[in-house]
Image (spheres, grey):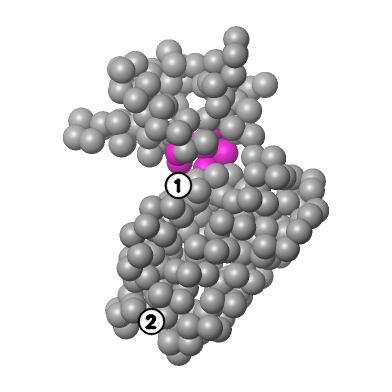
């Protein structure tokens, strides 16, 4: 099992105080999503405090939030570690994504402004750029932008909140599966077709293309962890 070391890496350090717990939690989520903190890695409070430049009180508040979200696990006699996404958990994540993102696709096609549709298209163009020279940090930022626009345009706050809670766990799988050039190109083609349906305000087609995209992502993600997809979404 790996252990997170502080070393000389100061890229995670917190720069300002307002919303400190949220800042700490977000930095840790990003580190987990990009694989900087890999699945199974032990999280040592002293090392994290030094790395982030925060007190143990602020760190523990953020860690409790991540534990509630299932991103980290407390193991008896071992302490905290980054949760491992098993094939069963991955399958469940993609099932929930298919249901909620399919709903978001329908609602976006129905309610989004023309400006939001243009912004979503631009976010897909940005994803295509990122895939050309793959960087986990840039990819997560671009994907987060895509979902922020999609969920804002859909206008369902409950679905948005639920999806945001599972997207970090899904990102652990995305970073691995999309490092494959073939899957990255296919993903962009799927998203471009999805945008075409949204621009046409075709709710049913947008829904089907969104779910098909997630099914393809699930297949690639499970393959990346050495497991075939055991059931349809």
Q: Residues within 10 Å of mark 1 (few under 14, many from 20)?
A: some
Task: Please state which of residues 153 and 30 is positioned toward the viewer in this rendering.
Answer: 153
Cα distance in 3D space between marks 2 and 1: 24 Å
Classify mark 2: residues with Cα within 10 Å, few (<14), some (14-19) or many (20+).
some
Would residue 111 be visible to someone looking at this image? yes
Q: Tell me the quadrant of the picture where the C terminus can be found.
A: bottom right
Q: Residue furthest left?
A: 18
In the structure shown, which secondary structural element does the residue marked by tag 1 occupy?
Answer: helix
Q: Is residue 125 left or right of residue 222?
A: left
The image quarter in which residue 155 lies:
bottom left
- Along the line of sight, the residue nearer the viewer: 114 or 176: 114
173 w.r.t. 6: above or below? below
Residue at 43% x, 87% y: name it: 201
Residue bearing the label numbered 1: 165
Residue 210 percent coordinates (x, y): 56, 72
Count of labels in the image: 2
Q: Is residue 12 magenta?
A: no
Element at label 2: helix
Q: Earlier in the sequence, mark 2 or mark 1?
A: 2
**Furthest-bottom residue in this view:** 200
What segment carries the magenta color?
A: 29-37
Residue 127 picture location, percent across and down? 50, 64
Query: Where is mark 2, residue-wise?
Result: 110
């Amino acid at each position: 099992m790996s252990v997170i070391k502080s070393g000389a890496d100061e890229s995670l350090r917190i720069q300002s105080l307002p919303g400190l717990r949220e800042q700490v939690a977000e930095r840790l989520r990003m580190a987990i999503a990009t694989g900087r903190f890999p699945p199974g890695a032990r999280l040592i409070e002293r090392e994290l405090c030094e790395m982030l430049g925060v007190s143990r009180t602020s760190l523990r508040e953020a860690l409790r939030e991540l534990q509630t979200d299932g991103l980290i696990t407390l193991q008896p006699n071992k302490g905290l570690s980054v949760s491992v996404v098993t094939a069963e958990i991955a399958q469940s994540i993609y099932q929930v994504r298919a249901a909620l993102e399919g709903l978001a696709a329908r609602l976006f096609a129905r309610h989004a402004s023309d400006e939001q549709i243009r912004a979503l298209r631009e976010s897909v163009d940005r994803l295509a750029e990122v895939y050309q020279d793959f960087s986990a940090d840039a990819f997560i930022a671009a994907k987060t932008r895509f979902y922020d626009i999609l969920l804002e345009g859909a206008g369902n706050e409950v679905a948005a909140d639920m999806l945001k809670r599972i997207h970090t766990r899904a990102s652990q799988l995305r970073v691995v599966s999309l490092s494959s050039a073939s899957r990255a190109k296919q993903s962009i083609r799927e998203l471009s077709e999805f945008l075409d349906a949204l621009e046409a305000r075709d709710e049913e087609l947008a829904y089907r293309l969104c779910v098909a995209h997630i099914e393809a992502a699930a297949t690639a993600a499970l393959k990346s962890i050495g497991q075939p997809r055991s059931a349809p979404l």
